[in-house]
Structures are given as structure tokens and as C-alpha cells.
Image (cartoon, rainbow, N blue to C red):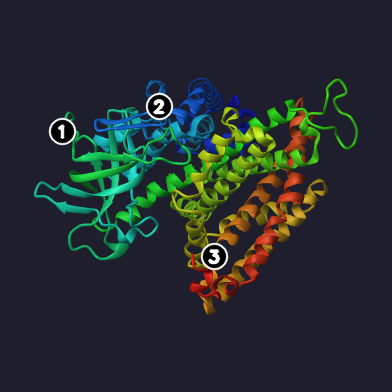
């Protein structure tokens, strides 16, 4: 397995030098304690935990997997003990409200820990990671009593949380769900049904698991308008030694993330407690789902970082052939493969996507911090921008993260296919990221249909305005024109392309579905172009001011150039696909797909 090293220098570059997190925290009510010294201490200690405790368990989790038994699911060797260390260190409470036992630090600071945990051991990180969504849902929609009973224990890490949506007959189309909730005289509900694909649904790491469950009341309206949301704990708080009609029927045998239990959960007359309003469950669940989607975007970043670290080390050590431009390693039998152009193509692709996506997700984390602003206008603006960027973070970052993971394996040649190097596990673990929390296709429909066209571009404008203002401010910066000119043109083209799709969709609604994935990918490449232009500006300013890290900053500029010249042209391919229209997808009759 590749040795994991937390990329603290790159994280600090994005947070401190590019995005200005120090000033950002100074302007947040909950950011007053997030001083530079405090933030550095948290990052350093978090890095140690991830490098020394979690990373060594990554391969263990993959090889052992989880074990099902009637009395419960057993996690891989060392997982439970690592979770105890995690809780003892106070990590679960880092970004939660002080009122309920949290440390009250900004959520964006917690994202740093999420990134490092995901890179060190994604399967393990899912156990506490899913609890964050449960916390956010209870914080937003729970009663005071529910917060006191459940939220405090989730924040402390005593208990963990899940979300239970999917059933065997309904994945994306939750309006078809059949799980029932029957009201009782004491105000509770009896929950009956089976949920599948429940990550961390059963395990031995915490004393209780709080399931957030979607179910339908008797007589509720059909479809998504008749779904309610419930808390269903494994053990009722008022009867801790008793089961609550919640059991794990089996765990899935799957391609990757073996260390995380993916469960079939049976609810047999389980006691549940309503969260929020009746028949508003899907609306309330979106609080959880948006948290999970940002977390899944981090998964794409995590696997790309792991791929980069492993591939660069291997490319420096592996000797094969001689450089076409002359011998580079005269004392060896061949040159290291890092000298070959095609290996550099793969390494630079991974690097450009990884660092660009890191800038994107930390920018979105800043916006998420503003969702707690006391200023209503600030919250509304942040909500608009979050709505637009969340599906891009989830889908684009996982698609390109998977590409990066594959490039990482490819750099090893045949050795990448062998388990001892860890690259094939990285690819397997990464593959799920494009599926759960809404597939790429679903995220793309959400972005183009619901977020952009249905709002007539209202969610899109805040971000494109940020890009426009940046380009205006740098219009006379001669040092930056190789980035500013194409970015300015791209930002305008983005708006024009959106309008074209909207006009075509007025004539044929299938145009939205036909364009959606290409539109999302185009949007992702446009976002990264903006962030690479900003990173190039920061690097040029650092070099102009004098620095002892000349190589570090030059590499940022060179990677920005690679991105603009080698990766950004992909946006034009996606544009061409969009402009080709829906007919080439929809013209073929179903029976003509073949007799299979």
C-alpha cells in the first residue's frame, strides 16, 4: 500500500493563500476561536491521526471486510479501537453547536478532517461521516427534546447515524417507497419495511445507531408528497438494553469499500419518532442528502490524492527505457518513468484535477459557513450558490476523481493491477462515488433542470458573477492573460449555452435530459478554470514578492497552464455534444437495440 501523507501544504495553499480563510473566519460569529494557531494545531493533530491510525487499517479493511452474524455486524480488525480514539480525541464534535456539546468551530474546518480521513481510509471514514448528515437533519428539523436525546450523543460520538432511503424497488424514484409508519396513541409510530444499501447500517463501533428513515403514513398522498421522516434508533433511549425491532438482514458483497458495512435493514414494528412535519419528509431529508453529496464529492478528491501520491513515488523509482531526448539516469540501466511524456500526462492530469477540485470544494465550504450567517440576505445568497454548486461538487468531482484513480493505477503498468500496491483498491473503492447519493445522471438533471432552467438561471448567476468580477479585476494584468482571456470567453459562453438549451427545451423537453451530463461536466471544467486562474495569480504574486518555495509556486503556474491547454478543451467537446441535440439519442426504436 502507498504510504499516506496528509497534503497539508496544498490544503494550506488553497485555504490560506487562495481563498483567504483567516479573514473569512474573522468575519464569522462561530469563527472567533478558529485562529490561525488553533486551525494549524487541529490540522496537524488530525493529520497524525489519519497517517498513524487510519491509514494502516485501510488495507486491513479491504482484505477482511465486515462480518455478519445474527447478533450484529463485526467491523475489520482495529476499526472499533480507531473509532474509540477518534471519540476520545473530541473529533466528532469539532464543528457542532456548543449548545449541544459541540466545539462550535466552522463546518469548513471539519471538512479538512473529512478530506484527510477519506484519503487515509475511506471505508472507516464513512462511519462517523454519515453521522454528520443525521446531526444536520436533527439540528434543522428536530424538536428540542429530540436534539437533547439524539443530537447530543451523535455529536459526542457515543452514537452514530445513518440515512435509510432506498428500497429494492425504488432507488432514485423515492415516491415509490413502501415502508409504513403507523401512528400510536403515545405519539410514536410503528415503522415496518426493508431498506437496502444502508452504509454503516449495523456495526460494533458505537453503542447505538440512529437511523433517519423515510416512510409513508396511512392515507398519505401518493408519490413524494406523501413521505414523512422518522428517527428510528437501534435501541430506544428509554430501554437501552432492548432491541427496537431494527435488525440487519444481511450485508452486501461488493466491489469496494469492503471495510464499511453496506446493510439490508429490516424494520419490524420498530418504534419511530416523527421529524418535522407529516408528508414533508423528502424536503427535510434534503438537509441530510446535501451534506452527503458534499461528502461524496470529497471522496472523489480523496481517491485522486491517493492516486497522485502513489503514482508520483512509483514514477520516480520505476526504471524503464531511456528518455527520447537523451539519457537522464546514466548510472542506472534505464531512466525513471517520470521522464516520459505520457507518464507526465497522467501525473499532471491527476495533479490538475486533484488541486482544482480541492479549491472548488473548499470554496463551497466557505459558502456553507455563510448559511449560518445572522444576515438573512447573506444566507439567501449563499443558499442560491450552494444549490448550483452542490451537484457539480458531487458529480464532477467523483467523475474526475475516478479518472484520476485510474490514471494512478495506469502509471504502475501491470503492477497497478496487483493488490499489494494498493492502486487497484483505490480504483475499486472510488467507483461507488458516482453511484450513491444520486448518480451522475441524476445530479446532472438536478443541476440543469431543477437548479438552472427552473429558476431561469437565478442559482447560476451568483457564481458566474464572481468569475466575471475576477476577470474584470485582472483584465489589465499582462502576466495573467493566458488564463484571463479564455476564462472570460468561457464564462460568457457558459451563459449563452445555458440559454440555448433552455430555448430548445421549450420545443422538446427531452433536450434537458440529453444535454444534462455534458452540461454538468462543462460546468465543472469551467469552475476549475476559474480556480486554476486564481491559484496561478496567487503563485505569481508569491514569486514576485520573494519566497523560499520557488519550486512549489512555479509548479502551481505550470499545472494551471497544463489545465488550460490540455484539460479545459474538453469543455468544447461537451459543448459539441450538447449542441448535437436529443435526436441522436432518442431516434432509435427500443426493439432496435438488439435481441439480447
Task: Return the residue at label 3.
Answer: 457
Q: Residue furthest front?
A: 595
Could you say where residue 278 lies in the image, as x and y percent from the top left?
23, 56
Name the residue at 68% across, 58% down.
571
Image marks 2 and 3: residues in contact by CB distance under 8 Å: no
To which quarter of the image does residue 501 belong? bottom right
Q: Nearer the viewer, residue 473 or 511?
A: 511
Task: Return the residue at label 1.
Answer: 238
Q: Nearer the viewer, residue 269 or 111?
A: 269
Name the residue at 60% across, 44% down.
357
- Residue 105 in sight here: no
Q: Comparing marks 2 and 3, which lies closer to the viewer?
A: 2
Task: Return the residue at label 2.
Answer: 76
Position of 359 relative to 223 (above/below) = above
Name the residue at 22% across, 45% down.
267
In screen coordinates, is 333 left or right of 497? Answer: right
Amino acid at each position: 500500500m502507498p504510504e499516506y501523507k496528509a497534503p497539508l501544504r496544498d490544503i494550506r495553499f488553497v485555504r490560506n493563500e487562495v481563498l483567504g480563510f483567516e479573514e473569512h473566519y474573522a468575519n464569522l460569529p462561530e469563527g472567533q476561536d478558529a485562529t490561525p494557531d488553533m486551525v494549524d494545531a487541529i490540522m496537524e493533530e488530525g493529520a497524525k491521526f489519519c497517517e498513524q491510525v487510519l491509514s494502516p487499517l485501510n488495507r486491513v479493511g479491504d482484505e477482511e471486510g465486515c462480518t455478519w452474524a445474527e447478533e450484529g455486524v463485526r467491523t475489520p480488525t482495529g476499526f472499533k479501537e480507531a473509532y474509540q480514539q477518534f471519540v476520545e480525541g473530541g473529533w466528532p464534535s469539532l464543528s457542532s453547536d456548543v449548545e449541544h456539546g459541540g466545539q462550535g468551530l466552522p463546518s469548513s474546518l471539519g471538512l479538512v478532517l473529512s478530506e484527510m480521513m477519506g484519503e487515509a481510509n475511506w471505508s472507516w471514514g464513512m462511519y462517523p461521516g454519515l453521522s454528520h448528515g443525521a446531526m444536520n437533519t436533527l439540528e434543522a428539523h428536530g424538536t428540542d427534546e429530540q436534539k437533547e436525546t439524539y443530537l447530543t450523543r451523535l455529536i459526542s460520538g457515543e452514537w452514530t447515524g445513518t440515512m435509510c432511503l432506498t428500497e429494492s424497488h425504488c432507488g432514485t424514484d423515492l415516491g415509490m417507497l413502501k415502508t409504513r409508519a403507523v401512528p400510536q396513541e403515545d405519539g410514536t409510530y410503528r415503522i415496518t419495511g426493508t431498506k437496502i444499501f444502508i452504509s454503516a447500517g449495523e456495526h460494533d463501533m458505537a453503542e447505538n445507531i440512529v437511523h433517519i428513515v423515510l416512510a409513508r403514513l396511512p392515507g398519505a398522498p401518493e408519490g413524494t408528497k406523501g413521505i414523512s421522516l422518522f428517527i428510528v434508533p437501534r435501541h430506544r433511549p428509554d430501554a437501552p438494553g432492548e432491541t427496537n425491532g431494527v435488525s440487519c438482514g444481511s450485508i452486501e458483497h461488493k466491489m469496494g469499500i469492503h471495510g464499511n458495512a453496506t446493510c439490508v435493514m429490516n424494520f419490524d414494528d420498530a418504534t419511530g419518532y416523527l421529524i418535522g412535519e407529516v408528508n414533508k419528509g423528502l424536503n427535510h431529508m434534503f438537509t441530510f442528502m446535501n451534506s452527503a453529496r458534499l461528502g461524496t464529492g470529497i471522496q472523489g478528491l480523496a481517491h485522486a490524492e491517493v492516486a497522485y501520491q502513489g503514482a508520483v513515488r512509483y514514477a520516480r523509482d520505476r526504471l524503464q527505457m531511456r528518455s527520447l531526448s537523451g539519457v537522464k539516469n546514466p548510472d542506472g540501466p534505464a531512466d525513471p518513468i517520470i521522464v516520459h511524456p505520457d507518464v507526465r500526462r497522467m501525473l499532471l492530469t491527476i495533479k490538475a484535477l486533484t488541486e482544482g477540485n480541492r479549491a472548488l470544494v473548499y470554496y463551497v465550504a466557505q459558502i456553507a459557513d455563510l448559511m449560518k450567517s445572522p444576515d438573512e440576505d447573506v444566507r439567501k445568497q449563499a443558499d442560491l450558490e450552494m444549490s448550483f454548486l452542490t451537484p457539480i461538487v458531487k458529480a464532477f468531482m467523483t467523475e474526475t476523481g475516478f479518472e484520476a484513480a485510474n490514471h494512478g493505477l495506469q502509471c504502475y503498468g501491470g503492477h497497478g493491477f496487483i493488490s499489494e500496491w494498493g492502486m487497484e483498491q483505490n480504483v475499486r473503492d472510488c467507483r461507488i462515488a458516482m453511484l450513491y447519493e444520486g448518480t451522475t445522471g441524476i445530479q446532472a438533471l438536478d443541476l440543469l433542470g431543477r437548479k438552472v432552467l427552473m429558476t431561469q438561471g437565478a442559482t447560476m448567476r451568483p457564481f458566474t458573477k464572481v468569475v466575471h468580477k475576477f476577470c474584470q479585476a485582472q483584465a489589465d494584468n499582462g502576466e495573467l492573460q493566458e488564463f484571463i482571456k479564455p476564462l472570460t470567453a468561457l464564462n460568457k459562453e457558459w451563459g449563452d449555452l445555458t440559454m440555448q438549451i433552455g430555448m430548445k427545451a421549450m420545443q422538446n423537453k427531452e433536450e434537458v435530459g440529453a444535454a444534462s451530463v455534458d452540461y454538468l461536466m462543462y460546468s465543472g471544467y469551467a469552475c476549475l478554470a476559474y480556480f486554476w486562474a486564481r491559484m496561478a495569480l496567487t503563485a505569481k504574486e508569491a514569486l514576485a514578492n520573494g519566497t523560499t518555495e520557488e519550486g512549489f509556486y512555479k509548479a502551481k503556474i505550470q499545472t494551471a497552464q497544463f489545465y488550460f491547454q490540455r484539460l479545459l478543451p474538453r469543455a468544447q467537446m461537451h459543448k459539441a455534444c450538447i449542441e448535437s441535440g436529443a435526436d441522436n439519442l432518442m431516434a432509435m426504436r427500443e426493439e432496435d437495440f438488439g435481441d439480447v
